[in-house]
Amino acid sequence: MTFSMRPSRVLQKLRAGEVVYATKLNLGDARAAEIAAMSGFDCIWTDMEHVPNDWSVIEKQILAAKAHGVDTLVRVARGGYSDYIRPLEMDAAGIMVPHIMSAADAREVIRSTKFHPLGLRPVDGGNADGGYCALGLADYLKQANEQRFNLLQIEDVEPLGELEEIIALPGLDIIFFGPGDFSQSIGAPGQMNHPLLLETRKRIAELAVKHGKIAGTVGSTGNSAELIAMGYRFISIGADVVALMQYYKSIMGELRNQKVDNVASVYAGLSKEATT
């Protein structure tokens, strides 16, 4: 039996000209990942930048998503090259690298996440992505470059002067605009309608289309059509913690709005019945 690397659902859809929808996970639990995967998203985005997840948690989430044919994207903490390649070797479909600050920074990330001829990612092949050495070296390198993706985040003002150079780099797969941190970077925290933020979001999409790259960002059901029209093809919507918080708050809101007449007399009646 010939082994091939698991195809990326995200890349398959993007190459077919479709839009990819992802959702973010803050909870370090494989069951949360499986629920998100079962709901129909193309990709779950799990986090190691802001969330104290360890590698065993990430591995279980990847396995849970794979069981339903869904990709896992791991946002890594900025660090050495090992931090970039571990998720890929655990068979995550992609990695997200936050706060790309320059073209030189982007080149270094690409070098660490792509094999020759696009980069010089360290080679192993004895892990889940390579079928535990079931793939020969040449096939492993070729399939990894074809079926695994990097996603570089623009969320600061510093790289704006080199934005086109960054997006045009060979080996960059998805350029992702992070509006939250960007709003802080421009001195307007939380102002999502700030002119520079809106201009940058549009410019990233335009440059991605120009250079044949994929533009991604966070969105909502309310603005997804606008983002798609702008040129975005990878859209992250929602988060597990938001879903839980809204659900539990809605339950408590309904309970508090229920009218229970004469609560004291009801309890008094129950108490009287219990003593007779």
Image (cartoon, grey):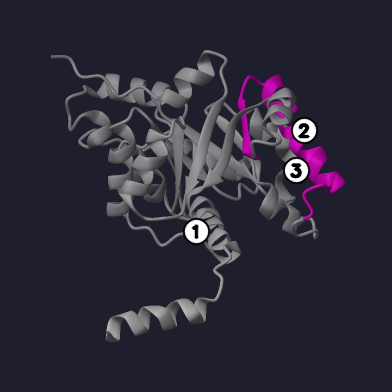
- Residue at (47, 50) in percent of width and height: 240
- Separation of residues labelled 1 and 2 (CA atoms): 39 Å
Foreground tag (1 vs 2): 1
Is 161 left or right of 165, judged from the image as shown?
right
| 10 Å crowding of disc 3: few (<14), some (14-19), many (20+) | some
Residue at image position (32%, 40%) is 62
Image coordinates of residue 197 in percent, x first then y, are 79, 45
Which mark identifies residue 203? 2
Q: Are marks 3 and 2 in contact (CB under 8 Å)?
A: no
Decide which of tag 3 and tag 2 comes sooner along the chain: 3
Which residues lie in the magenta part?
Answer: 191-219
Callout 2: SS: helix
Specify the amino acid type for callout 1.
Tyr
Q: Is residue 201 magenta?
A: yes
> What residue does disc 3 label?
160
Distance from label 3 to label 1 (Cα)? 41 Å
